[in-house]
Image: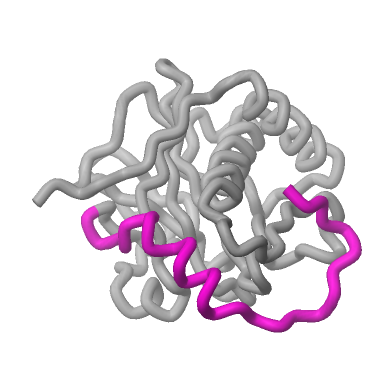
Amino acid sequence: MEKQFITINIDTSLLEETKISTEIKKQRGDLHNISHFHRPIANRSNAFWTGSVGEVATARYLRECNDSGYPIHTPDDPSEFEEADIVANGHYLDVKTRAARYGPHTHYWMFAERASAERDVDYFVFCWYNHINQSVTLLGFLERDVLLQVAHLFRKGELLDNEWVIPCESYGVRISELETIDILPTLLRENGRIREATKGGAVV
């Protein structure tokens, strides 16, 4: 059975939100949100953009599915959201986005840096940014504990698919191993978490 994804086209509104998010990351030097697997790695501005567009698209999807009105925040103050890209009903979400000139396939690898997986995160959401047709595909998600169980730990310097050198210790999963993204809104709605009040988030 073919895996089902959610694809979001980048419209004017999403584009503007991504620009704002990217500028915030640049201003605060948000290095942990730079994907080491984005090419070219040296182009930090592109890496900031890739991270932001995945986060904004994920937040939009969760907002559209939020029929019960639970709070969804995106960070604009790193002191309040050090661990998360999105906070939804008390859950911390870390969004990992891979950029390419082509679309995703289920045998492709997605990554979470080991340092990210060791933070206080509840779920990892994985996205694919096609910068040719300007779309973001929500590939799926994994609970953090599940990620640590099923993922392969790649060491720095390992060669992946005879093409990529792994730049840092990272957990890798194939897209086929992810939970489908349409399950996530229900989990967030039915299993809210109580966390300390936040001050720096903007309700989206």
Q: Position of residue 44 (x, y in %)?
A: 65, 33
Up the image or down, 123 lies above or below 57; here it is: below
Chain part drawn in magenta: 176-204
Q: Can residue 84 be seen in this view?
A: no
Q: Residue 131 at x, y = what percent?
A: 46, 22
Q: Is residue 43 left or right of residue 106?
A: right
In the image, taking residue 90 as reference, residue 113 lies left or right, namely left
Q: In this view, does 203 lie to the left or right of 123?
A: right
Residue 186 magenta-drawn? yes
Looking at this view, name the residue that lies furthest to the left: 1
The front one of 57 and 182 is 182
Q: Which residue is drawn at 65% across and 70% down?
A: 89
Residue visible at 48% across and 62% down in the picture: 185
In the rendered view, tell whether residue 68 sits above or below residue 96.
below
The one of 124 and 34 positioned closer to us in this rendering: 124
**Residue found 78% across the figure and 52% down from its top:** 203
Q: Residue at x 65, y 36 (%)?
A: 48
Residue 86 belongs to the span the image colors magenta: no
Instruction: Looking at the picture, tell me which residue is in the foreground, 18 or 25.
Output: 18
Name, please, the residue furthest toward the front: 67
Residue 180, relative to residue 192: is it above or below? above
